[in-house]
Image: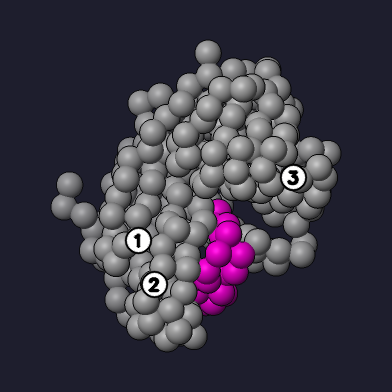
Amino acid sequence: MTTIIEPRVHDLGDGFVVRRAVPTIQARSVGPFVFVDHMGPVVFEHGRGLDVRPHPHIGLATVTFLWSGAINHRDTLGSEQVIRPGDVNWMTAGRGIAHSERTPAPERAAGSLAHGMQTWVALPKAHEETAPAFYHHAAASLPQQRRDGAWLRVIAGRAYGEESPVKVFADTLNVAIDLEPDAELALDHGHVERALYILEGEAQLDGVDIPARHLVLPDPGTRPKLRAKTPLKAMLLGGEPLDGHRHLWWNFVSSSKERIEQAKQDWLDGRFGRIEGDDEFIPLPQR
C-alpha cells in the first residue's frame, strides 16, 4: 500500500518555513537520502533574507536545488558559489567540512522569493571519511526532457534514460518534476527505493488525490502514474538502500557513534577550519 507522510514543520523566522519529510517513523531513509527538507516558498522583504550561519557536517553530501531565489554558499575549502533556479550544489562532507548559506547581497537589498529543496545523502561506509569537496552544476548542464506537459530535470543519478553529471557514490534517483495541468507521468521504476515529494499543486497518483507538501512512498516495483490537476512541482528521489544503519545527530551522519562524538569535539575545538568572510558560527547544541 502506498504510504503518505506529513512532514514536520520548522519555522525559522521571517516567514521562512522548512518541512522535513525524512527522517520519519515511516521512512528513516529512502535510498541513500537521510534528510529531505522542503524550503519555502517564502517572500523576503528588502533587507531580509536567508542566514544559515557556518555549521559542520561529516559523513554525508548535501544536495541543494531551487525553483526560485538564490543562495550564496561558502565553505571551509574556500568555495563561494551562488546557486540559482535549476542549478545543483553538491557538497561532499566526507571527513569534515563547514559551510554557510545566505541570501546574496543584491537579492537581500531588493527583496526576493525563495523556494527549493535540500537533501542529505549518506555516504557509503567505504566513503564516509573521503576528502571533502564542493561541486556546482549549472542548470544547462543537467539532462532535461520536455514532453506532453512534463518538464523533467535529472538532478543526480539516473532516471528516464538520462544520467546527471553530478558525481554520486551509490545508485541514486533524484529528479525535479514540473507538470502542466492534466499532464501525466509514469514514475521511474528502475530503483529499489523511491519517494515522491509534492512541493506545490494538486496531484493524483493512480487516480488517488495526493496532498501538497507531503511525501509519498510508492509500492516497490510498481510504476504509478502521477497526474497534475493544477500546475505541479515535485521531486522524485531514492536509489540504492543504505549499506547499514546510520546515526544522525545534528548535522552529523555516521555509521559510528564514536565518530559523531569526535565530530562534536572537533567543532567545539575549531578543527573544521574557518570560512573566509564569514566569522559567525552555530554553537554545538546542548543535547
Disc 1 crowd rating (10 Å Cα; few below 14, some 14-19, many 20+) is some
* Place of residue 145 in the rendered image (x, y in percent of width and height, measured from the top left): 81, 49
* Place of residue 12 in the rendered image (x, y in percent of width and height, measured from the top left): 29, 59
At horizontal 49% and vertical 85% (from top left) the residue drawn is 106
Left or right of 274, for residue 167: right
* Place of residue 279 in the rendered image (x, y in percent of width and height, measured from the top left): 33, 80
Q: CA distance from mark 2 to mark 1?
A: 8 Å
Picture quadrant where residue 56 is located:
bottom left
By secondary structure, the bulk of the magenta-drawn segment is best described as: strand
Picture quadrant where residue 266 is located:
bottom left
The residue labelled by disc 3 is 150
At horizontal 49% and vertical 53% (from top left) the residue drawn is 118
At horizontal 37% and vertical 52% (from top left) the residue drawn is 18
Disc 2 to disc 1: CB gap under 8 Å: yes
The residue labelled by disc 1 is 16
**Amino acid type shown at disc 1:** Phe
Picture quadrant where residue 111 is located:
bottom left
**Amino acid type shown at disc 2:** Phe
* Place of residue 179 in the rendered image (x, y in percent of width and height, measured from the top left): 68, 45
Q: Which residues are magenta?
A: 63-85
Q: Which mark is residue 175?
A: none
Q: Which mark is residue 44?
A: 2
Disc 3 to disc 1: CB gap under 8 Å: no
**Amino acid type shown at disc 3:** Ala
Q: CA distance from mark 2 to mark 3?
A: 29 Å
Considering the numbered disc 2 on the image, is that residue within a helix, a strand or a loop? strand
Considering the numbered disc 3 on the image, is that residue within a helix, a strand or a loop? strand
At horizontal 41% and vertical 68% (from top left) the residue drawn is 43
Q: CA distance from mark 3 to mark 1?
A: 29 Å
